[in-house]
Amino acid sequence: MSHSDSNKTRYSDEELAEFGKLINDKLAKAKDQLDFYLKQVHESTTNTNNRVNGVEEGIQSAENERLVDLAGRQKKLIHHLENANLRIQNKVYGICRETGDLISKARLEAVPHATLSIKAKQMQVKK
């Protein structure tokens, strides 16, 4: 972050639009991934050809649990990304909820739904 960025209280509308595009791209990918997981679960539960013996059934059951867990994580990610979009609309995106400082662009590019700056995150870990 350049020195002038450290004095900013919020990201510009242009910057918010860039973050919005990043979030929407991630949102589309997350929704596609969720659809994939749900389709896999549906196919495995409706395909009776997989039910050959107890061992394969156990393997399939474990795989379904894994897919359901992955789907749950995708749903959480989608929820966080949708909330990030709301913060963009309200022009409060990228402001740390603990310190009130701007979250670095590098952090937001890596984790676009972040609500804590690195500093606040580290303070949280120390508690």
Image (cartoon, rainbow, N blue to C red):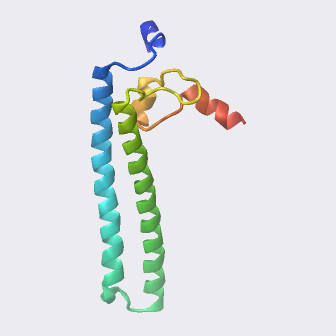
Identity of the residue drawn at 53% across and 28% down? 117
Identity of the residue drawn at 63% across and 31% down? 122
Decide which of 39, 49 is in the foreground and name it.
Answer: 39
| 124 on left or right of 36 | right
- Number of dots carrying numbers: 0
Above or below for 53 versus 65: below
Quarter holding residue 43: bottom left
Quarter holding residue 106: top left
Image location (x, y in percent) of residue 110 = 41, 34
Quarter containing the N terminus: top left
Quarter holding residue 42: bottom left
| 31 on left or right of 61 | left
Identity of the residue drawn at 45% across and 30% down? 107
Q: Residue furthest front?
A: 90
Identity of the residue drawn at 38% across and 91% down? 52
Image location (x, y in percent) of residue 71 = 41, 61
Q: Residue furthest right?
A: 127
Q: Residue furthest bottom?
A: 53
Above or below for 9 versus 60: above
Quarter containing the C terminus: top right
Image location (x, y in percent) of residue 84 = 40, 38
